[in-house]
Image: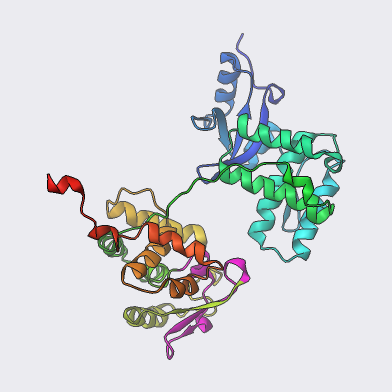
Amino acid sequence: MRMTFNSQNYKFLIGEHQNQNVIFVYFQFDIELKNALKEKFPSLKWSATKKCWYLPDRNAVRKEVGITKIEAGKSVLWQIHPINQPALKRMRETLQLKAYSQNTIKTYCNEFAQLLYLLKDISVDKLSSERLRSYFLFCVTKLKLSENIIHSRINAVKFYFEQVLHHKKLFFEEIPRPKKKSILPKVISKNDIVKIFAQVTNPKHSLMLKLCYGMGLRVSEIVNLKITNIDSQRMLVHIEAAKGKKDRYVTLPLSILGDLRSYYCAYRPKIYLFEGQYGEQYAIRSVQTVFTNAMRKAKINKSVGIHGLRHSYATHLLECGTDMVFIQKLLGHRDIKTTEIYAKVSNRHLSKIKSPLDDL
């Protein structure tokens, strides 16, 4: 007799995989359990890196596997044991009082909720440093989480114990952190950027991508641009409350001024420079899709997202001889060390080095 799906036979954990929200599925491998799961969820996939199965994080899937959520205004509380629900509430309130961004609040609460979900009826407030160390070891060895996610999870739990419970910082000093990978920014050549722009015929979409590259903007900064931020007399653009809640000015490319004026006359945006169908901010996801489609049409086979335009802006400025301090200010980096990473991908000096192979 064929086995039917029973959620009690599996462990489900919310996480992130390949920049997508997913639900990881763990169970003692059994072909019948796998077949029952696959029959229930045709979208089930295997992750070779995580060494486990996973499902898309959708409300319908959560309902089927027993992970539900309770809407509380704009916040989302995972259904965890009542003994730990006040902890998650205090966590969110403290983040809000400290005026953290909505993205940070969401990330910290989601990462903290993973711990609460596993604890069940054990109070998180009673956990020792050693118990937390064991939990993070579980995240590394069993869940196979990436270094970045481990750091994010440690930061979230650390915030709760130090900022909410006011434990001394020594409490977390015994917990080692994984060494982060030294990943270089992905840069697109000027020739390829020209090819990308050539594939975009929609004036709004074209202007978005050109400003991303021409001013080194994050995609969130593009959608947050307001008409009042643009000073065409001084050829400056005011970037308000960017990452880290820092304002900065960037130079408006002279070559884009004609396109900008034509776009304004055609679309007549009211508040935001790029508006959606109903006058709201243009969606970040939509801008990312515009870039992805342009890359595909230009037949550029590189694994790089729209943030690559910002990386390319910085790298190309450096290759043109722009001082690193000015690039730091234009990008809005707090620490010059963050900007110095572009020196590692610039060919400004590398191109002058001759390989010994060429002398053979």
Residue at position x 42%, y 52% from top?
Answer: 184
Q: Where is residue 278 in the image (x, y as percent from the top left)?
A: 54, 69
189 lies above or below 122: below
Q: Which of 300 and 325 is in front in this view?
A: 325
Q: Can residue 277 be seen in this view?
A: no
Left or right of 88, for residue 300: left
Q: Position of residue 203 (x, y in %)?
A: 35, 71
The C terminus: image quadrant: top left
Residue 26's x, y, as percent? 63, 26
State how many labels appear.
0
Please state the horizontal and vertical placement of residue 104, each as a whole percent of the image. Answer: 66, 57
Which span is picked out in magenta?
A: 217-245
Query: Quarter holding the N terminus?
Result: top right
Q: Which residue is drawn at 83% across and 48% down?
A: 87
- State whether residue 352 appears in this view: yes
Q: In this view, does 170 lie above or below 306?
A: above
In terms of depth relative to the viewer, which is nearer, 189 or 106? 189
Going 69% across and 51% down the picture, which residue do you hit? 108
Viewer-proximal residue among 163 and 213: 163
- Which residue is the extreme one toward the top? 1
Residue extending farthest to the bottom is 233
Examine the structure image and report whether residue 143 is included in the region drawn in magenta. Answer: no
Magenta segment includes 230: yes
Figure quadrant of residue 343: bottom left
